[in-house]
Image (spheres, grey):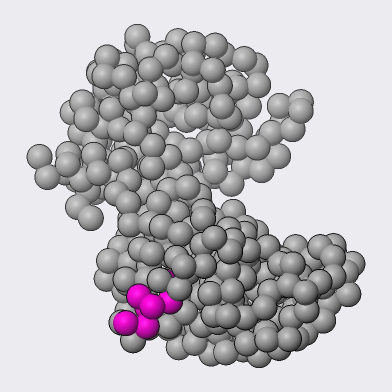
Amino acid sequence: MNVIRFSDLCAQGKVQGQRVFIRADLNVPQDDQGHITEDTRIRASLPCIREALTAGAAVMVTSHLGRPTEGTLRPEDSLQPVAQRLSELLGQPVSLVRDWVQGVQVAPGQVVLLENCRVNPGEKKNQEALSRQMASLCDIYVNDAFGTAHRAEATTYGIAQFAPIACAGPLLAAEIDAITRALAAPRRPLAAIVAGSKVSTKLTILESLASKVDQLIVGGGIANTFLLAAGMPIGKSLAEPDLVDQARAVIQAMKARGAEVPIPTDVVVAKTFAADAPATIKAAQDVAEDDLILDIGPETAQRLATQLRAAGTIVWNGPVGVFEFDAFAKGTEVVARAIAESDGFSIAGGGDTLAAIARFGIESKIGYISTGGGAFLEVLEGKTLPALEILTKRATG
């Protein structure tokens, strides 16, 4: 994917004295008192901001926070706590600027935070007049917010159309590189893990990956629907019987390419969905009518682990069992550790996936961890993300 990279502009000396507008993702969780409870996204934005400051730019940063109503700024929607945290982390003042669309005063070496961009009327609908006005504030626009790349909004798309230069920040560039490495030019065999409660929410992803991957591992409620498609009993487990035909079509599409959807041969079941429910390992064909499948069994987990250790590239989205409950976490742990041990390149994304990675302490063993959420899923679906599309257009003239 051909985009202009902000790091290259800095290295070429093209940022000195320029007004740089950075669209970051600073949408951090807060408690009822407005205190930030987890600042990973703020910390992740620092390299881009520091790079701009070091290069001698006048720096403006904005982000969304929460779900504000356009035209109305409520106290809980304000980026004031973020400005304070940025000041602490950068070691220099970061003032919060409200009503900034008509103009911003910032000198080279300074950084200001522009109030919640989604408060501006026209932001969500990518209004052209708003986009042009924002573009007039800067000499260089930098998108460093992959988590919003699937949205065509004024600060993610429109401003990139009209700014003199539009480029990708280091976070966004890293996502582009990881996605390209995993999906556009993967080392084989390419394995994908797609797990979740419903096939319906991941069907387009499964169909897209079925034409690309060598192994398509399904987990969670999705696996139960695939078990039904394979003619296996699932008891009272979560599944979508009306999507069995689609699951069979995915299996057939993979088989036609000489690829595989590994169906669990053993599972871990319980009679109730509870952390303290007694867990029983059963052969997949022995699941009783009153059983709930809550994890893959040890035989299946080891078979998948062997495949994953031998993979050249691994794409991981979703735990394969109810890993929040200790009795049903083993399958996800075995799979996670196999990914960590693999010599192949791995990319992981999705909230539950990130939680599993953190639980098993394998962050440093994953090739790339995407924080994009919905954007990551849309990439797996084979969609073109609007924010990346416009940066590509601007890079090629």
Q: Is residue 289 left or right of residue 168?
A: right
Is residue 254 highlighted in magenta? yes
**Residue at (38% x, 42% y) in the render:** 149
Against 31, residue 105 (above or below) is above
Tell me which segment is drawn in magenta: 250-256
**Nearest the camera: 185 or 203?**
203
Q: Position of residue 131 (x, y in %)?
A: 29, 21
Q: Is residue 251 visible?
A: yes
Is residue 34 highlighted in magenta? no
**Which image quarter holds the N terminus?**
bottom left
Against 55, residue 192 (above or below) is below
Image label count: 0
Where residue 330 sits, quadrant-wise, is bottom right
Where residue 295 sits, quadrant-wise, is bottom right
Q: Position of residue 190 (x, y in %)?
A: 38, 78
**Residue at (43% x, 29% y) in the render:** 61
**Residue at (28% x, 27% y) in the render:** 159
Q: Is residue 298 visible?
A: no
Q: Position of residue 338 (x, y in %)?
A: 57, 82
Q: Main secondary structure of the magenta part?
A: helix
**Residue at (47% x, 47% y) in the render:** 374
Q: Position of residue 184 (x, y in %)?
A: 27, 66
